[in-house]
Amino acid sequence: MPKLVFLSDLHLGIDAPTNWYQSLVHQPMLQAIFDHLGQETGSIEELIILGDLVDQWTYLPSVQPPDFRAIAAAQPAILGPAGALARAARALPGRVTYLLGNHDLLVDPSEVEAIFGAGVRVIADGKAPVYCPPAGGARADIICTHGHRYSMFNAPDFQDVPALGLPLGHYVTRLSALWVSQHLQAGQTSANLAGSGNPSGWVLDRDILENVVTGVVSGRDDLSQLVFSTLLQATGQTLDLDFRCPDGTTTKANILANSTYRGLYRDWEDTGRFPVSDYGLLPGSFALVGDLTDNLGHFADVLGKGRKVVVMGHTHAPQLAINHYDLVMPYLYANAGFECPSLPDFNNSGKRQYPTFVEVELDGAGNTYEVAVRFVERVAGSSAGAPAYRVADSSLLPIQSIRKSD
């Protein structure tokens, strides 16, 4: 039966120590997914890369983040002309689609085309693309987006940053990378730290973030000023700290905190900028809470109006449930999760994080959508020094299905 496959949040970088994806750790896990897809190409209707394929955020403030070409050169096994993604594109001609997320917001489609030709179709929308795969039919029953458009920290911000559209979260993640670098032991990378890969870029204690949220919602504090002061203090920096931007220019923390992003929370409560039709009621409150809880459920409801399946990524938290728009109209919400959990999180038997992806399968009669969250597990008996991985036969969460007529 035909199926759609959604991969999200691979976060491929240049293997800088602060990158969440480390090829020595994560490449075998990711390769297991592509090997699985290679065996399933006959049934795959479309492979959709749902944002953050590459990472231009997890770098020290003093470093100019790399472009897509530099990252591809650093990750030839996945992004090279003979790499796993290129092989998938050849096996699925015209059926590989790449939507940009927040960590790859600035990727130029021509950079992707230079490597993959027309084999990978890039959908680049400055406001963050929303896509309805053709398999959803004329009614567009299936809709997907990375999800960062609903995050206060991560939504593209062309109002405050007209040239690049970089949101506050970009600089939060750069400061987070600095904090990580200060806490790594010799020979370690971000993959050695539990909790690495938080989608907001925040690596500090969640209680600190909750205090930030409380101060902002109460109107006592400004979001950008409070976030910068907290993170600068945590990393031993001052407001004079320079950030090297992706375009090679520099800016200071003082400008970002006190000018560029000042009033961001109030902006989100402005329904003219974030209309109810696209974001629902109280977009600022839900966007901020979503950043704190890694949950986009409120915004999935908005997307789910008149749909049957909504798929997102961004939160790094796999999810699958039947929700209801206006408490009446049922739809399935799936989140594809995260492809590069840290080693402590992957090995945590109590709360294990797996590399995950979503499959949406259409039944033979085309009347039912069945959705599964698939995951990568370590092959039993493989050595700790050279572990082998495979896609598990089961779904990480209970498989859900919904009829078109529901």
Image (tube, helix red, strand yellow):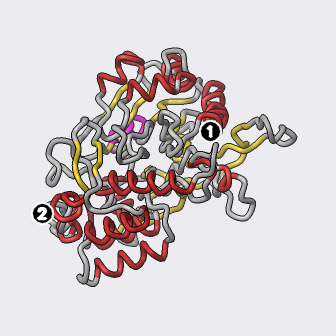
State yes or no: discs 2 and 1 in contact (Cβ < 8 Å): no
Label 2 – label 1 distance at C-alpha: 42 Å
Q: Residue at x 29, y 29 (%)?
A: 108
> Within the image, what quadrant is residue 283 found in?
bottom left
Q: Residue at x 40, y 72 (%)?
A: 327
* Label drawn at residue 272: 2
| Residue 337 against residue 16 in the figure, above or below | below
Q: Which residue is mark 1?
A: 26
Q: Identify which residue, 360 or 147, lies in the foreground.
A: 147
> Within the image, what quadrant is residue 24 found in?
top right
Residue 142 seen? no
Q: Nearer the viewer, mark 2 or mark 1?
A: 1
Magenta-highlighted residues: 131-139
- Going by the numbered disc 2, the residue's amino acid type is Gly
- Going by the numbered disc 1, the residue's amino acid type is His
Q: Residue at x 42, y 44 (%)?
A: 59
Coordinates of residue 317 in the picture (x, y in percent): 53, 57
Left or right of 219 in this view: 349: right
Among the two numbered marks 2 and 1 on one chain, the one whose residue lies closer to the N terminus: 1
